[in-house]
Amino acid sequence: MANSEDQDSEQVWHTAVEWVIREHESLSPVERQELIGWLNMNPAHRKAYDEASRLWLITGLVPPFEPPAED
């Protein structure tokens, strides 16, 4: 059985992954402020978010870049 610290760490990881996914789908200004608040709440949040972001990039889950259309 996992201890409380392991469960907390797992929850932080899952939350970080959810934020990364949501961010790539587009965040509203309110959601962006929620993300910033969550990141600033605990250094472990920032660490997990950074790791999830790197994993997202490494696995190729980044949407292709589409340059703005020229008028």
Image: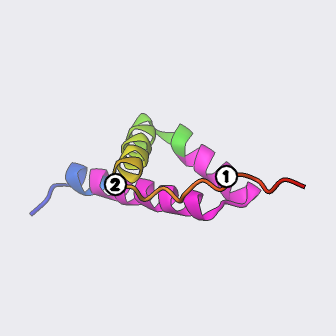
> Looking at the image, is mark 2 or mark 1 nearer the viewer?
2
66 or 10, nearer to the observer: 66
Image coords of residue 40 (percent x, y): 55, 38
State left or right for residue 36 relative to residue 6.
Answer: right
Residue at image x 37%, y 60%? 14
Q: Amino acid at mark 2?
A: Thr
Image coords of residue 1 (percent x, y): 9, 63
Task: State the SS at label 1.
Answer: helix
State left or right for residue 29 relative to residue 9.
Answer: right
Residue range in magenta is 9-38
Q: Residue most toward the right?
A: 71
Q: How busy is the neighbourhood of tag 2: few (under 14 within 10 Å), some, or many (20 plus)?
A: few
Residue at image x 55%, y 63%? 22
On the image, numbered disc 1 is attached to which residue? 32
Task: State the SS at label 2.
Answer: loop
Mark pair 2, 1: CA separation: 24 Å
Q: Which mark is residue 70?
A: none
Q: How busy is the neighbourhood of tag 1: few (under 14 within 10 Å), some, or many (20 plus)?
A: some
On the image, numbered disc 2 is attached to which residue? 59
Residue 2 occupies quadrant: bottom left
